[in-house]
Image (cartoon, helix red, strand yellow):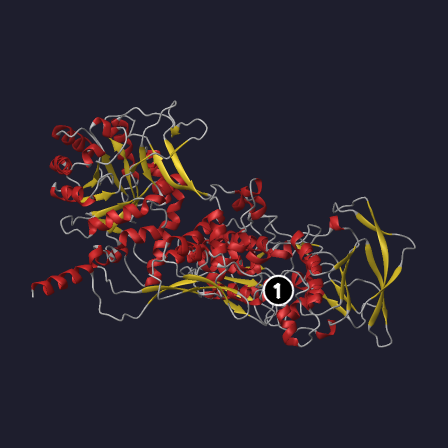
Amino acid sequence: MADISINFAGIKSPNPYWLASAPPTNTGYQVQRAFEAGWGGAVWKTLGEPVLNVTSRFGASHFNGQRVAGFNNIELISDRPLDVNLKEIYETKKLFPERVIIASLMVEPKREKWHEIVKRVQDVGVDGFELNLGCPHGMSERGMGSAIGQHPDLVEMTTMYAKEAAEVPVITKLTPNITDITATAKAAARGGADAISLINTINSLIGVDLDTWNTLPNVNGKGAHGGYCGPAVKPIALNMVGECARNPEVNIPISGIGGISTWRDTVEFMLMGAGGVQVCTAAMHHGFRIIDDLTEGLENYLDEKGIDSLSDIIGKSVEKYTDWSNLDLNHKVVARINNDVCINCNKCHIACEDTSHQCIDMLTDENGNDILRVREDDCVGCNLCSIVCPVDGAIDMIDLIPTEAPMSWNDRQAAIEILERR
Amino acid sequence: MSDLLKNLISGEVLAANFEESKTSFNTEEALDEANRCLYCYDAPCITACPTGIDIPGFIKKIASGNLKGSATTIMNSNPVGASCARVCPTEELCEGACVLNQSTKPIPIGDLQRFATDWAIKNEEVLFKAGEKNGKTVAIVGSGPAGLSTARELARLGYEVTIFEAKSEAGGLDTFGIVPFRLPKDISLWEVEQVENLGVEIRTNTEIGKDILADDLVEQYDAIVLAIGMSKVPMLGIEGEELEGIYDAIDLVERTKNGDYAEEFIGKCVAVIGAGNTAVDGATTSVRLGADNVKILYRRTEAEMTAYDFEYEFAKQDGVEFRWLTNPKRLISDENGHVKQMECVKMELHEAEGDGRPRPVEKEGSEFLMDVDIVVKAIGQTRHMKMIEAFGLNHNGGVVKVDPETFITSNPKVYAAGDMIFGKGLGEAMVVTAAQQGKDTALAIHERFKESVTDMHNRVN
């Protein structure tokens, strides 16, 4: 059986799965239940000055019969007294010394405030800190959370404040509500962060009630933007992780967060450079028991691939992720339709005809059967037909044998420049 | 049954009739249904499964693509989980309990279970490991669901297990007793192989009392588990039973499991006596062997028949006719000693007696003759009395008495599980129940010996 333990920025965890700082890690009772179920670690719900919360708080986006494709919330950081949280952290760590407890922190961007909370929390024995510089709602209006996380200089400074007092690793959590994630990732690295975690939630309004015209979630006829997460945000998170992983100025471990629901998602995040992952929405949807398939599926995947240790896959896809201008312009892909598998829904035809390059013909074969055929000369290999196709194996995207040597846009521009110079 | 190749008579074509009738889910079907599962907590489907399979768990693993994990979850709880995926009366068990019955339609749990276990079979996955040997030996007599299940669990706990099987191949009912178009023999033999992979020795063609004595077993092993199931169909006890053309349904099914397709059914008129699942098997087998007309005769009514609903439905789909309140009285020979007619009598139901079922009583003067070429008997099964007596066990009309908690018989070294402890008049015993009894028996044995064995924590996945 493959080894799925990790050593993340010096923090050892029996598996890569930590519960993200969120409602599931609100209390010792919950975190202990999660550890009993098998979670490797938990990032405690953010500690700071206790807040007041509103009801209701959550909303979800259901898509075509699947519930919780996306999830949003307007809940703030911990509303429980700091003393109570610290006592429960102490007790939980004592019961589960092999599991990881990270304290998420958020205070005003003042050096003494950060020093004070870091020292207080450190005293009860945590494995690390996560700086919540990403909460996009409520706290940001008070100059904390993403109000800090959107300014690289404040990210650097806050990280530095925490590092000055911390004796355990400091993970700076980044907000995705920013144009270039690497700007704040680099700032965190400059501030001395031992690692970064991303992404926090994305500014969102989950919906509007068609009868009351209330925005959702509804608080006495009013609403405010929340933070979006869940399976729908995974591609956004995966890109941001990849961008940080391939940026040489970041160069610190990454804790991947954002829509991770299955062991497959985990593999993807780790291939893109995450050294561990954090999960929230999937646990909120199904309970802590999902850890069973998350760990077993990962072990079986590694065994099947003949890989001994999960650490061996970290970042293995990063070098494949580059700028568009480095992609090979001479690479040709075309679609081929297997009519013996095709069920004749014609979705590929109409998608191509109306919205792509008009290269899938609806024809009748010699036996009078309806068939679909790609005119390969006109096909640009966009993948749309295979994306809309509902049947596995009905459409193959084929790599054509190259007729010309690989050439990227950058290669091309460089060649033109040389020619022009002559 | 229009798709059956009735008119074609070569053995090869008959063989096609005996291929598994229900197709397996393809990946898309499996994913659609797996994603429809709500993944309930404390799910009623788990409670409804006699072996307590974590059904939402194995289904979620199908959805995530962890098929090995899915098959492991199933087989961990049920050592004959691949067979049960096909033969369980799921609408009375897991699927009947599915919460979606109250809103849309239940998850096809049996089909998903088959999808996951088929994957394991196809990929030749080894799902379990034997425990470290603890020095204790157990002899198991019979390799059907109860025996295999006991052996599997004991081997994982570190016991050295030897199974004694009278037939040429292991698997018992699943290998020989369930029609191949519902449960192909290969599936059962894969489950046997899984148990053998744990180091369990299966001695086939070995009969107790002939090849080895019951007393020797009791002397040589630390514990003995009897899981010998039931025996042949009893005699009808009517005139003409010795004629040519009279078949035992269990023998008939066993022949088809061995690829021996009796050609004498082609174009014939067949009467099956009885209305349990074995009777349905006898009837649908007759149809597939090319019989022209197949009738099931039952002395009670549709309401009392013991066949599962889906078996009844299956028989009707096969074009089997049903004659309720009808009982055979006499079999009449042609000039060659072959049955040609059956004298029947109409019955009426009177108030229930001891077993709670209405009592069928002959209707005076209602005798009539029915033309038949073949009669298939399926009126239940006899007990292995000789074996029960060889071990000197207390029993009630062939039903071996055991402690309901420990499965210990009147001989403290001898345990019993499966059909042989299944009481009369309780319908038909299920494969899945036998599997659970096997697990429980293994645990009871371990409970008894765990103090004295060296390593009791070596159970591995």
| Of residues A311 and B254, the one drawn nearer to the viewer in this rendering | A311
Q: Residue at x 10, y 63 (%)?
A: A420
Q: Residue at x 63, y 68 (%)?
A: B18
Q: Amino acid at mark 1?
A: Phe
In this view of the protein, can residue A13 be seen by the observer?
Answer: no
- Taking the view exactly as shown, the residue that stands out farthest to the top is A220
Which secondary structure, mark 1? loop
Relative to residue B430, is residue A406 drawn left or right? left
Residue A192 figure quarter: top left
Name the spot of residue A183 as percent of width and height, x first. Answer: 16, 43
Residue A303 figure quarter: bottom left
Q: Is residue A395 above or below residue A287?
A: below
Q: Residue at x 31, y 54 (%)?
A: A267
| Of residues A353 and A216, the one drawn nearer to the viewer in this rendering | A353
- Taking the view exactly as shown, the residue that stands out farthest to the left is A422
Instruction: Quickly name the residue at label 1.
Output: B181
